[in-house]
Image (cartoon, coloured by chain):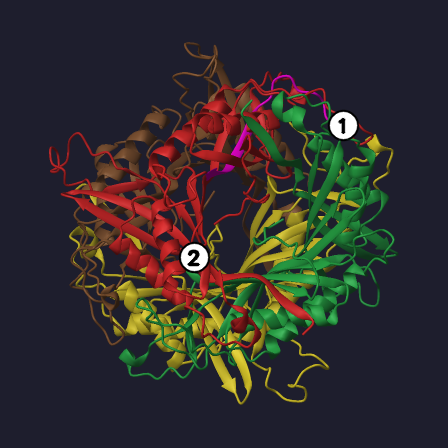
Chain colours: A green, B yellow, C brown, D red
Amino acid sequence: MPTILGQNQYGKAENRVVRITRDGDTHHIKDLNVSVALSGDMDDVHYSGSNANVLPTDTTKNTVYAFAKEYGIESAEQFGIHLARWFVNSQEPIHRARIRIEEYAWERIPTSDSNSKFIGSDEVKHSFVRKGQETRVTQVTYDGSRWEVVSGLKDLVVMNSTNSEFWGYVKDKYTTLQEAYDRILATQVSGRWRFNWTDDEQRMPNWERSYEATRRHMLEAFAETYSLSLQQTLYQMGSRIINHRSEIDEVRFSLPNKHHFLVDLEPFGLKNDNEVYFAADRPYGLIEATILRDGADARIPVDLTNL
Amino acid sequence: MPTILGQNQYGKAENRVVRITRDGDTHHIKDLNVSVALSGDMDDVHYSGSNANVLPTDTTKNTVYAFAKEYGIESAEQFGIHLARWFVNSQEPIHRARIRIEEYAWERIPTSDSNSKFIGSDEVKHSFVRKGQETRVTQVTYDGSRWEVVSGLKDLVVMNSTNSEFWGYVKDKYTTLQEAYDRILATQVSGRWRFNWTDDEQRMPNWERSYEATRRHMLEAFAETYSLSLQQTLYQMGSRIINHRSEIDEVRFSLPNKHHFLVDLEPFGLKNDNEVYFAADRPYGLIEATILRDGADARIPVDLTNL
Amino acid sequence: MPTILGQNQYGKAENRVVRITRDGDTHHIKDLNVSVALSGDMDDVHYSGSNANVLPTDTTKNTVYAFAKEYGIESAEQFGIHLARWFVNSQEPIHRARIRIEEYAWERIPTSDSNSKFIGSDEVKHSFVRKGQETRVTQVTYDGSRWEVVSGLKDLVVMNSTNSEFWGYVKDKYTTLQEAYDRILATQVSGRWRFNWTDDEQRMPNWERSYEATRRHMLEAFAETYSLSLQQTLYQMGSRIINHRSEIDEVRFSLPNKHHFLVDLEPFGLKNDNEVYFAADRPYGLIEATILRDGADARIPVDLTNL
Amino acid sequence: MPTILGQNQYGKAENRVVRITRDGDTHHIKDLNVSVALSGDMDDVHYSGSNANVLPTDTTKNTVYAFAKEYGIESAEQFGIHLARWFVNSQEPIHRARIRIEEYAWERIPTSDSNSKFIGSDEVKHSFVRKGQETRVTQVTYDGSRWEVVSGLKDLVVMNSTNSEFWGYVKDKYTTLQEAYDRILATQVSGRWRFNWTDDEQRMPNWERSYEATRRHMLEAFAETYSLSLQQTLYQMGSRIINHRSEIDEVRFSLPNKHHFLVDLEPFGLKNDNEVYFAADRPYGLIEATILRDGADARIPVDLTNL
């Protein structure tokens, strides 16, 4: 046989699970999209089609729903840890489990000051509107001894309407761009950060608190950096996180430069003093980089993939 | 010639315009997607290709950007009114203009309490994050004398985790559904509401205030209705708007019933007491209806289209 | 009650049904996405939540699958007719049914000339690849006596790389466009055509043959028209259909002008002799029109909606 | 400085270039989406914002369009090779260039047998319809000495309506799946294959011929494999390619198991003899694996990313 099997994995992807928790009349919601990928002794199923080592993907789906009941969903990370541990520990042929989770945030619907029979009661504490901003993501990997948790977000769109310049760059025979001394800087943030928690003996991070703080530092760095290049802003966002969050050793961003071009209004006798912009779709600059705590390994892949 | 020309229109669609307004160091942003559709004496261009009556779609694009400078963007509705009036009044062959606008909301990025040289200053009042919840929409139509303004929103996802039942329905030979006495009710709201402002002589509504109030009434009605059917909830949402907003005569909703199915955990020896749900994609129930102020005409089309 | 109920409808949308038919070892496939919308005596369910007249959307879904077995799927149109007739005739409160269907085409996978144990047999006549070109659509409406069938397609992308001009248009103060004497004309066709079959007493069209012929006439008209405007091309496409297909009385197209801009290569010392183009996304011209057989009513709505 | 910069790259993504070539009246079209990613001495731009080593992303865009004129587009791979070589060789700070390209296929519009003034002429050899099946992709990487070319495709949907089974799998406490002895097997193929051409001294593959043959072998293996698991089918698809195409050393597939569930029609007194299926969206099984020529390195990343 001149061909051999390389890296392989399988599982059920995109299990949409919603978990409602009741605290009296006050309901809480966790809304996840969970993808399971398992690997191990899987040569036979590829070579001969023997499923003797294969836990069906349908079973991995059932496990997601059963665990939502058995363990609840404290956080996406904690939920992923329960699942990854189970698959590796309960199935001898499974040597490695990777759980990817998307989380959609919800907020409560404010109730009316009048016109409602519910006033003064807590009966509408079961009504939610999807926040709709970024999607929070995490990936938990376990091989029976070592944990790797990489969390992050995608589709968070941010803009600075000033304090951004771009000049002093290389000019070759194909360069036509004019230098800019006051431009809009906008991007749709895709970021991932890797935790240095790897071992059940270590104290586990508070995943929810870590997310909120990391997101805040990242946004503040974006807002507060006077930018000479999107690369500089990206590096500030990443190093701000590393410097403030001791539980995180590595950050990677993929930042499309969402170009906002100043529209030329001179043909119409109008002056455009950084007021009117065309928001372009394609092409876009794409700036990607990893920022590491000194001494840490780089483990987040070059391409940030959707979960 | 056995064929004749029926309704026709043309224009430039999806002009993405971002308008920054400076109030000292504090910046304000309006972010729109503007589509122009014009109609009038257009037989020749269809029959022979003569463009003698055709203002190019490229010109309608230029007009959008020029007007963003000349008039600013107070509201999507007001901006649409400026544009529609211009096309009909300035071009003899144009008898009717329809301007459709999507608006994306932004909020300010909160700044850090420490670690920032910007503290106590207003220098970061130029940093924004896209809100990412619903998309606000409007459609302004003008024929030289009469205005029609239909505003609304799309992609606002809401959920009640209880206070919803479904029973007492018709059962035929293809019915297998079990009655439900406590279910999740979730939908992705697409709504449009028509204003009774039609004439320059009338006092124009405050478009921004109207939107905020209408959206609030709609959400409150969703949250506060104990629901026996999604149709009942829809009607409450619409009539709440009509009853509270005298400027609105007609509302139409298209509400997909985003099914959340209770997962059967009994095979695993677990009881699912309205805790764990599978959020399904397709198929979905689709409930659509118009609610009218008594005596008003129904003018919003059956199918709510994206702009 | 100052508010009243207007047009309303409900049903299960996007029922994905795949029907395999076996002709010996040769399999045939029909792949549909079926949406049901019913209307009738539905005041109570909106006003009070009483479901006494409501056939559940879940039942409409079951009916789609049961009918795929009972009647098979000869064509999307014929399948829609079976469904619409059933809902109106079997349920007293239902006065009108509208069935919308998307159809995805598949073609057979050619088999190898060698290296296969299947050579000379018909055993691989069960292997398909999705064609992936246009999506075929139809909408069947029935009110108990009159039928309306509107079929069509969407997402068919076509291009003429020459034989298109655009000049002689109106120039106002916002016009900057240069006239073009040889440009690319490209569009993503969305078209709908209405059949004049309305009555069970009339001879029903051959839906499959009609679709193939109509699509061919439309494509030929696009290819063979020397175009002075996209409106002219659109009219040729529609009138070609009306002139050749006696079963069709009305056609409507929505044609985005997918701009291909000639790239200015002069800064690099290069001449661009209609060779290198930038394919733009947004904005785009949007040209929409109805073409009617003389004397026919216009019944297709202005906005062509997805099913 | 406690943080350091890791892997980083930048460039202009999604440059949409259409190249028309004229062979008398017969036109040929190449339709690409080209993304450039450059890396090298880029510490300063991240640390201080100095752009002294930065060729603007706008320039990389210009280069794409200029090269489409200067070199033409013989194949996506060859075009990527021209671009990658240029960036690395012409810019001292650039040490590595990665060019990703999507290609959209077009076919000619057949012309009418009658009703056309163009009959017998070649004047309509400029009319095209987008094929709309798979998207062809390639990625060319160059570091000044070594080439790596990984080509492939995405979004090719295939189905076998029989000759697929699934049984004999592991059953744990969460397993409820019934064994299947005749099921539909359908997937949306995403595949990548790596060429063993790495050096300008080697003879370059014929990229166009290689793609057609590889795609054909892959489809044949899918159609001709009697499948006991999707993993087995995947392995057959990959090894068929390696065995027939000496220029390819590594193949990776990501195959979602697009579940087609047999609908239970028994409640309606109907027997479903593998005739009526529900095509599900989410969740789906996801099967991923690499197949290698014996002795070859595995270089294609685990996650197949869109370009």
x then y, percent, for residue D124: 18, 40
Q: Residues within 10 Å of mark 2 (few under 14, many from 20)?
A: many
- Magenta stretch in the rendered image: D175-195
The percent coordinates of residue B71 (x first, y second) are 40, 81
| Horizontal side, residue B134 vs residue C297: left or right | right
Say which of B272 and B241 sits in front.
Answer: B272
Closest to the observer: B170 or C271?
C271
- Which residue shows up at 70% across the image and 68% down it? A242
Residue B69 seen in this snapshot? yes
**Left or right placement of residue B7 versus residue B283 in this view:** left
Relative depth, front residue between A231 and B272: A231
Residue D13 counted in the magenta span: no
Q: CA distance from mark 1 to mark 2?
A: 48 Å
- Element assignment for label 2: strand
Image coords of residue B10 (percent x, y): 31, 58
- The crowding category of the residue bearing disc 1, from other C-alpha atoms within 10 Å (few below 14, some 14 to 19, many at least 20), is some
Q: Which mark is residue C102?
A: none
Residue D188 lies in the magenta stretch: yes
Q: Measured along the vertical axis of the image, is residue C280 above or below residue A257?
A: above
Q: Nearer the viewer, residue B168 or B218?
A: B218
Location of the N terminus of chain C by quadrant is bottom right
Give the numbered dot on residue D176.
Answer: 1
Q: Mark 2 = which residue?
A: D36
In the image, what residue type sits under mark 1?
Thr
The furthest residue to the front: D201
Callouts 1 and 2 in the same chain: yes
Residue at 39%, 78% (x, y): give it.
A179
